[in-house]
Amino acid sequence: MSSTNAGVKTRIEWLVNQARFLYQQDYIAVADIDRDAADPGAGLLLTEDPATHAALTQAASIPEFFKDILQTLCGVLFAAIALKGFLVPNHFIDGGITGISLLVHEIYHINLALLIVILNIPLIVVSYFTVGKRFCIRTTISALMLAVCLVTLPDFVLTADKLLISIFGGVFLGIGVGLVMRAGAALDGIEVLALYTIKRTAFTISEIILAINVVIFAISAFSFGVETALYSVLTYFSATRTINYVVEGLQAFTGVTIISGKSELIKFQLVNNLGRGITVYKGERGFLPGQFDVSTNVDIIFTVISRMELRKLRNLVDAADPKAFVFAHTIKEASGGILNRKQHH
């Protein structure tokens, strides 16, 4: 043992000393060492002037900014095509602020582009205080871009089939809204209204949005007929599902937790046969009714797989330990690690 730990009598004291020693050291990232080997004149990023560091950070964010702009533009175009080519010519209604705008447009024949901007203004103001300045600015730009597209695009009808209108109108609209959401903005401020309202009521966000949409579709049924209103509900459902796919990704990921007395064999199978990285937690198993005092130490295994690999994982685990306790849950987003690297192939 080094002199740093002289006089240490217990393992806890030794661990505390080691943590204190590590905390007091200065570290250099491997990437910085490699960079300095190639260019000895380059200063370490960890020791650079704060202004220089801020400038580099800002420069690194420029490509991301242009990516967001491109996503927003594509999203706005998809939404405009959905409105001009599917919904507006056939008097279909959607949910949220877009649905309210369509409803007012159909009843009072007010310009749709103007309505979308006007009805989003209060929610944009609310988003400044509830979400943030950046979101507010981007949402404003998105709403204005959509208004410009609605004004400049000519009137056209892609189909007169009501089922195709309700499904593909919702899909195009969902793609547009989802792309804008991925860029950090919103084309429909109904979620902002729900966030604002939830602080003042006992209802959840889903219940608030559902209540607003029920009113929209009820007015639609009264004004344009029950059939059109029902098709509009299908449009809203298609749009909602498409938004989920666009925002969360077409590939759904699943987090799997495995508790087994044969954890070593299962770990070998997951890493070498399934090709996945794993995380191991140290825990205890047992504590059954009538045998509460009986427990054993166990490795709790966690891994993330694609939805298509779930059956293969279950087969591997069953072959190793048919009595293993396995539970899975959907992961909205996953990045990095072996999972992300495999997707590029």
Image (spheres, rainbow, N blue to C red):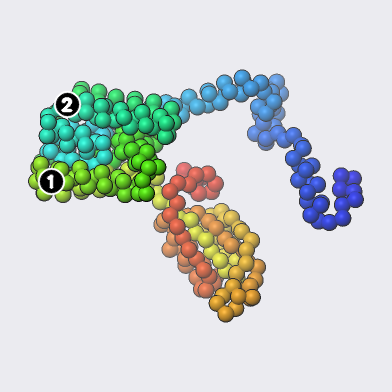
| Residue 172 percent location from the top left of the image | 25, 39
* Crowd tier of the residue under label 1, counting other residues whose Cα lies within 10 Å: few below 14, some 14–19, many 20 or above: some
Q: Please name the residue that numbered disc 2 is placed on.
A: 111
- Looking at the image, which residue is at 84% across and 56% down? 10
Q: Is residue 175 above or below residue 120?
A: below
- Going by the numbered disc 2, the residue's amino acid type is Asn
Report whether residue 273 is seen: no
- Going by the numbered disc 1, the residue's amino acid type is Ala
- Looking at the image, which residue is at 50% across and 49% down? 339
Q: Is residue 248 above or below residue 189?
A: below
Q: Please name the residue that numbered disc 1 is placed on.
A: 221
Q: Is residue 104 above or below residue 165?
A: above
Element under label 1?
A: helix
Query: Would residue 283 be found to the left or right of residue 207 on screen?
Result: right
Query: Would residue 282 be found to the left or right of residue 219 on screen?
Result: right
| Residue 25 percent location from the top left of the image | 76, 37
Q: How many marks?
A: 2
Q: Nearer the viewer, residue 200 or 342?
A: 200
Task: Return the disc, 1 or 2, that comes first in the chain's sequence.
Answer: 2
**Quadrant of the image occupied by residue 139:** top left
Q: Nearer the viewer, residue 203 or 190?
A: 203
Q: Are marks 1 and 2 in contact (CB under 8 Å)?
A: no
| Residue 207 percent location from the top left of the image | 31, 49
- Looking at the image, which residue is at 67% across and 28% down? 46
